[in-house]
Image (cartoon, rainbow, N blue to C red):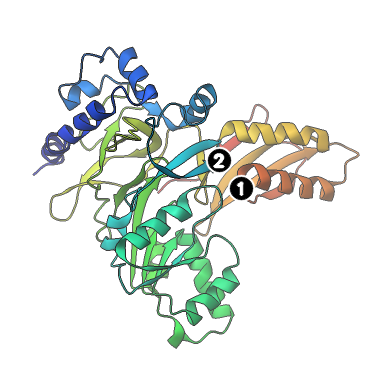
């Protein structure tokens, strides 16, 4: 079977569920009603190809939509059961719907062999953004015990791995590498290391880094998702592409027209969540991927190949250009005349550097400390701060200097 044939079969198989979701949500979700009306689709949607007339709702548009229609932009059905509310950078506010595994990450954990009897160290943040809760709920759905590690205190977490018999890890691949280094530096016995499965996400996983991790952790698989829609794709084997879960409908679209590209060509990942209470229909993630065939001919995503949206992901957190501009504007009262944020990658770890030009009379050490504190508060990512003589003329406030794999 070719990629084109597999894609056609996928659309035919999943299309009815998308249409059922749209029909069930119509009249209950104001933002969806408005989009359908603007696209001339108020008479109903008979097939999934017709739904492609609906313009893509971009991730970059969510902050403005939520400011215009607070608090959630009219994206949630009235009376929908909500368990938690989160605030991701942007700010973008996201609801957690009531019920088990609302972001649908359990299939990715199961593919990694994580389930009943496992003790899982969850190294995503539990503070405001939803990643920690996402995986906590998924672990509970598969019967695993969770250690809510969050981000930071890696030395303490190394001891936890030994003392509590942690068997699985969830987090950034670079964080797992740091955890392994801290474990060795602490002189903990190799015999107390039982961690042999890891589900990693939110960062690239190049082959050399995966090989480094697998020297200690037998199974290291990659998954992909967003705070808004949850799981989008997950590995079932190394190098086989990302399988798409049942409760989402994924398209790869031209970022300009919003129309699906030809099978195998790169485009923006556009997702429809099959949940009538929070139906993010044709939601543009800003990530670039393409369709490929897996080992047994199944349709898979190739992984994240780059970005088309304005936001940049740094160590698992999105940074938006307007946030960078706001920080730089705030620093103008702190002795900074100009600056920029630069994202690079060093030894498989994202590095956010804030380069600032200080007033002639300003103390560069005070400027650097102030800039680091204000950036951390606004972006939730700790930067390296460089006080420089100049920044390139006309430079953007946020520059992604990484080479995507």
Quick check: 16 above or below 372? above
| Tag of residue 380 | 1
Residue 35, position as x, y percentages in the image? 35, 19
* Position of residue 303 in the picture relative to residue 387 (left or right): left
Residue drawn at point x = 13 percent, y = 55 percent: 296
Quick check: 182 above or below 249? below
Quick check: 143 above or below 204? below
Residue 392, position as x, y percentages in the image? 67, 33
Nearer to me, 27 or 251: 27
Residue drawn at point x = 52 percent, y = 55 percent: 126
Residue 194 visible in rendering: yes
Nearer to me, 291 or 15: 15
Crowd band around label 1 with a 10 angstrom C-alpha radius: few (<14), some (14–19), many (20+): some
Residue 333, position as x, y percentages in the image? 82, 33
The reply to whether discs 1 and 2 touch (Cβ–Cβ < 8 Å) is: yes
- Secondary structure of the residue carrying tag 1 is loop
Residue behind mark 2: 89
* Position of residue 9 in the picture relative to residue 25 (left or right): left
Nearer to me, 197 or 125: 125
Q: Residue furthest front?
A: 79
Nearer to me, 254 or 57: 57
- Secondary structure of the residue carrying tag 2 is loop
Crowd band around label 2 with a 10 angstrom C-alpha radius: few (<14), some (14–19), many (20+): some
Q: Residue furthest right?
A: 361
Residue 326, position as x, y percentages in the image? 67, 32
Quarter of image, res 257: top left
Check the picture and name the quadrant holding the N terminus.
top left
Q: Earlier in the sequence, mark 1 or mark 2?
A: 2
């Amino acid at each position: 079977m070719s990629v084109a044939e597999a894609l056609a079969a996928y659309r035919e198989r999943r299309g009815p569920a998308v249409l059922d979701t749209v029909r069930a949500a119509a009249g209950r979700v104001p933002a969806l009603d408005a989009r359908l009306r603007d696209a001339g689709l108020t008479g109903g949607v008979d097939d999934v190809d017709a739904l492609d007339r609906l313009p893509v709702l971009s991730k970059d548009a969510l902050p403005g939509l939520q400011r215009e229609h607070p608090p959630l932009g009219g994206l949630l059905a009235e009376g929908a059961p909500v368990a938690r509310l989160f605030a991701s950078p942007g700010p973008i506010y996201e609801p957690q719907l009531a019920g088990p595994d609302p972001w649908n990450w359990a299939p990715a954990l199961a593919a990694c062999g994580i389930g009943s009897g496992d003790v899982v160290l969850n190294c995503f943040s539990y503070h405001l953004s939803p990643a920690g809760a996402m995986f906590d709920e998924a672990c509970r759905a598969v019967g695993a015990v969770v250690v809510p590690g969050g981000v930071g205190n890696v030395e303490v977490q190394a001891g936890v791995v030994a003392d509590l018999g942690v068997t699985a890890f969830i987090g950034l691949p670079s964080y797992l590498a740091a955890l392994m280094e801290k474990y060795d530096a602490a002189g903990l016995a190799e015999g107390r290391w039982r961690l042999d499965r890891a589900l990693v996400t939110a960062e690239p996983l190049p082959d050399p880094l995966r090989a480094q991790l697998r020297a200690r952790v037998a199974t290291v698989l990659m998954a992909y998702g967003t705070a808004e829609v949850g799981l989008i794709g997950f590995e079932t084997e190394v190098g086989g592409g990302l399988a798409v879960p049942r409760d989402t409908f994924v398209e790869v679209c031209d970022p300009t027209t919003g129309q699906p590209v030809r099978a195998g060509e790169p485009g923006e990942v556009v997702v429809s969540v099959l949940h009538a209470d929070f139906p993010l229909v044709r939601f543009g993630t800003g990530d670039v991927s393409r369709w490929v065939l897996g080992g047994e001919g199944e349709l898979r995503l190739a992984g994240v190949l780059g970005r088309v949206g304005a936001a940049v992901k740094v160590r698992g957190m999105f940074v938006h250009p307007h946030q960078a501009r706001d920080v730089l504007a705030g620093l103008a009262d702190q002795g900074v005349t100009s600056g920029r944020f630069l994202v690079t990658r060093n030894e498989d770890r994202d590095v956010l550097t804030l380069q600032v030009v200080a007033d002639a009379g300003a103390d560069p050490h005070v400027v650097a400390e102030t800039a680091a504190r204000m950036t951390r508060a606004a972006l939730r990512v700790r930067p390296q701060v460089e006080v420089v003589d100049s920044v390139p003329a006309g430079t953007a406030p946020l520059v992604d200097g990484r080479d995507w794999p």
